[in-house]
Image: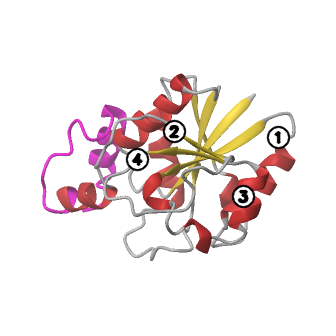
Amino acid sequence: MKIGLFFGSFNPIHIGHLIIANTMATGTDLEQVWFVVSPQNPFKKNSSLLHEFDRFDLVSRAVADNALLKVTDIEFHMPKPSFTIDTLIRIQEKYPQHEFKLIMGEDNLAQFPNWKNHDKILEYVGLYVYPRPNSLPHKFKDHPAVKFVQAPLLDISATFLRACLKSGKSIRYMVSEPVEEMIRIKKFYL
């Protein structure tokens, strides 16, 4: 099976993540998309980061009704912070029967050369890139291991959602109903 890996903190997962994942799973040669919940991103501070198990539960709830979307906790069992190349090697060892592709927003391409072993990532799995607002120029436009995928241009951010929750505003329609319900019941991000 050819599987797209969608890495992120998903703090919280929102409708933009789900639309991109579903577009990748239904509009490309990918047969599934797996959300890789990252306990700690090497480029981000984790001061407002919900516990990894809670974020994993939110993603599980968000994708429960779609057989094309899955969630994995593979990085929970790795040294922190995890680097993408290390996770890719680990996941390929664990699932040698599958072929993997890395899903990435175009806004990350300008910084991609700063990633640990970015050239190996291109060689090892390649990238499926979706458009993002305010993306900076990058050198990967014609790279043979980079596939640009038409997808809705969405500008929903988890930072915005957390600010809404903290100030008591509604996040309805920006997250799936099961995610909104869990956030409300457990009083996340207040």
Seen at 63% across and 39% down, the residue is: 4
Tell me the magenta residue range.
165-190
First in residue order: circle 1 vs circle 4: 4
What element does badge 1 sit on? loop
> Where is 87 relative to 20, above or below?
below
Q: Circle 3 sits on which residue?
A: 121
Q: Is residue 164 left or right of residue 119?
A: left
Identify which amino acid the numbered label 3 is placed on.
Ile
Labels 4 & 3 near each other (Cβ < 8 A):
no
Q: CA distance from mark 3 to mark 2?
A: 26 Å
Question: Which sits in the foreground, 30 or 150?
Answer: 150
Labels 1 & 4 near each other (Cβ < 8 A):
no
Between marks 1 and 3 in the image, the one whose residue lies nearer the viewer: 3
Seen at 62% across and 29% down, the residue is: 32
Q: Circle 1 sits on which residue?
A: 95
Identify which amino acid the numbered label 4 is placed on.
Ile
Q: Circle 4 sits on which residue?
A: 13
Seen at 82% across and 40% down, the residue is: 95
Q: CA distance from mark 4 to mark 3?
A: 25 Å
The disc placed on residue 60 is 2
Q: Residues within 10 Å of mark 4 (few under 14, many from 20)?
A: many
